[in-house]
Image (spheres, rainbow, N blue to C red):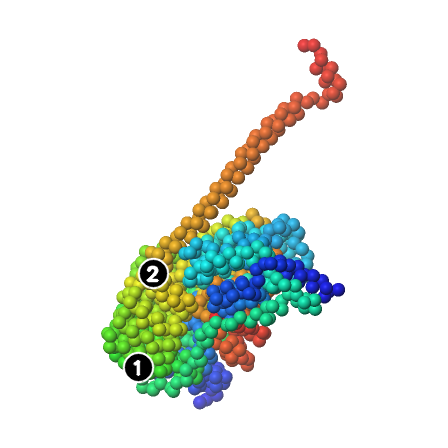
Amino acid sequence: MNPSHFAAYQHQLSRRTFLSRAGFGLGATALSTLLNHDSLSRASASPQLAIPGLPHIPAKVKRVIFLYMSGGPSHLETFDYKPKLAALDGKPMPDSFTAGQPIAQLQGQVLKAQGPLTKFGRYGQNGQTISDFLPFHRQIADDICIIKSMVTEQINHDPAHTFMNTGTAISGRPSMGSWINYGLGSDNQSLPGFVVMTSEGGRDPQPIAPRMWGSGFLPSQFQGVPFNSSGEPVYYIESPAGVSDDLQQQVVNSVRALDSHHHEQTQDPELLARLAAYETAFRMQTSVPELLDLADEPEHILKMYGAVPGDGSFASNCLLARRLAERGVRFIHLYHRDWDHHGDLVKHMHTCCGCTDQASAALIMDLKQRGMLEETLVVWGGEFGRTPMYQGKGGPGRDHHIKGFSMWVAGGGIRPGISYGGTDELGYHAVDKPVHVRDLHATMLHQLGIDHKRFTYKFQGLDMRLTGVEEAHVLHDILT
Amino acid sequence: MKQSYAFLIALLVAAPVCGVDFQKEILPIFESHCVKCHNADKAMGKLKLDSAAGIEEKWAADAHLLTKGEPDQSELYERLVLPKDDKKRMPKGADPLDQDSIDLIAAWIKEGAPFTAAVAPAADQPAADTPAEVAAPPEQPALEPLPLPEVPAAPQEAIDQLIKSGAKVMNLYSGSNLLEVTFVVAPQPPTDETMKLLASVAPQVMMLNLKNAQATGAGWSELAKLTNLTALNVQNSSFSDAAAKNLEGLERLESLNLYGTGVTDAVLEPLKSLQRLQKLYLWKTHVTYDAAAAFGKEKPDLEWNLGWDHPVVARKRLEEQKQDFAELLKQTEAEANRLKTDLQVAEEAHKTAQERLKEVEDSLSKLSDEPAAEQEKSATKPE
């Protein structure tokens, strides 16, 4: 090997990559599943296995469906009823609550209290408080655990999304869906293990960056794959005109042979990711049309969700989420992006809840009747909540709020029909059993059979974790 | 000083002299009807009815639980007297309490719901909470979760054959010999052959999903060998009433999914022996509502599901919704009427304002710059 060749080789294969990939970890499992069978077949896809050592404990659930209410739904108009805030309506917000606190758009303005803009009722056996904006949620009051004491660390949308998805505000870390797929593998190699769908409908939706479902430093086959909610479901999934199935298969096999050969020389893990992506994509050519064809869904099920096939609505996506769950997809992330209600909150809540309330409840009930709720963790919530203070871009609204907000979780191993934690009398600070985003992540991993402290990936000399290095607690009080 | 103050309070709380004795009369009612679900371990609705302290704890968090003197505004009482088929009625899934017990609880609340006995406490014992400590009620022996069974590793050959037949085989957790076997994404449905393969890993199989299986009686009979089975899913398979007999001895079985099978009410009889059964899925089967409800009554810990669209289930839901929407209709009608009145008032005010404005404008336009005296003069000037 002459020196220039050696330099090129060094460039291709870093020592760390070689050492970390040769013989164990992803290298071993992925190589054996990807390289050691001769030709590709749509029928006999061997499932991607869990990494060695996982799961740490018996799992309560097999998968997560995250109903992500992007923009920050108001806890004060959904699940957190604050009569004292009503009494203070229009009066100055007491300094004792707001002094020194981070403020987003209301910076430098006079802070006035804004009473609840809707009525609440008590529903279910335990009298869960649910606002009149969410009439369908009444039906699942006994199935969900409402966490009323969420806190996060980021007050603007993008960093807050990043925080909720990756456990840190630093961009570029792996999303929770990627972590989980990397750790546990996928039951179905004909579909991606991490699917993201963003719904249409409602008013002008805010953007959501694709790095929210990025795999960061994890191998890139674990990134979320966006399915389009209307039109072509996955870009370029159809073979080009004139390319037959056989020809397609030959191409993929040839590419695989070349990539494998290259991989033997370089041991580049991204080549394996690329191989995996080709294979999954090839199988998706048949699995995706079957998945998205709702012709086999009876009318009463469509009605239950309020779904019209192909409309790209949150309702259709919830139905598709169930179908993805049935097919062994590990992490299903539905975004509905319309919850940023700085003004005209009442009007926009009607729109947003109109788009999401029925389908969220239907998803729970449908999973339940199929016996799937006990093996699924469903999470509902956004990146933060909204201020007890008035903001008036148009009619009354509320600003971003991170010191206390509500989410709900339901499914396997979660105590149903309870509320956990709480905010102060004005709904400002989570004072009773605050739940940090990291605690939510730790609990999610726990339900999947993963100890968040032991679930690490070496990157830049550090053992990286979804929950980072700060304290994170599994919420044992909400578990059965 | 502080001590005597507390003593006063204790006296006040214990004031009703010839009243209902919580410890002797109320607590026993809760103990025989309620503590199964409302105890320290399994506090449904965060409510523990096994001691005064337990009730006080919930009361502190939820004032609506008890309103002194007002049984009708105390959830603890309200939930006992709801219509028989109301989901919120307590005790859940059992007959209502007898009228005497209900009356006694009402009387107790009317007296202010005191937890202390109606005897003056000894002078040096100010704490009103001492009876709570004395009152350690006999705990209902709840079924302790069984420790995971210790089993040897399954023969690798059997596992390989299962995988070949389309199964996904996973260890329950890393290092465990227990297995989860699932055919959810299998290219072909499981058959009698598959069932025989499963029998060769019988002690190891803890969770089993045989979705769409097409087995005969002989195949299903292998299930009886899977003695450590905790969760069984046979949805949309050929599983039948007769096949259910093979489950009788599976004492660990907690979850059974029969959705989409042809089973009838007869399937429930062999399931009665399953002490730990907690979840039973019966959607799209021939099991009737009444049979399922009767079965559920025998197993208070069991959650059964006939499906969202089952006619009886749907009727109950729709009736609840009817109430909700009737209420909403009333509210919105009242609101609309109020707004109509407001609108009328506003329109009238608007009209009046318009008229007043016009009058003032007229007066303004008529006003000349001459001093008032001059005007008067000119006004009095004869034409």
The span from disc 1 to disc 2 (Cα, nearest Å) is 35 Å
Quickly name the residue at label 1: B199
Q: Is residue B372 above or below residue A294?
A: above
Residue B286 x, y percent position in the rendering: 29, 63
Work out whether residue A139 or residue A343 is closer to the camera in this orientation and state it.
Answer: A139
Specify whether residue A411 is in view.
Answer: yes
Quickly name the residue at label 2: B290
Q: Is residue A124 above or below residue B53?
A: above
Q: Earlier in the sequence, mark 1 or mark 2?
A: 1
* Chain to which the residue tagged by mark 1 belongs: B
What secondary structure is found at the residue carrying circle 2?
helix
| Amino acid beneath label 2 | Asp
* Chain to which the residue tagged by mark 2 belongs: B
Work out whether residue A469 or residue B303 is closer to the camera in this orientation and state it.
Answer: B303
Question: Residue A352 shows which numbered tag?
Answer: none
Choose top left, top right, bottom left or bottom right for residue A297: bottom left
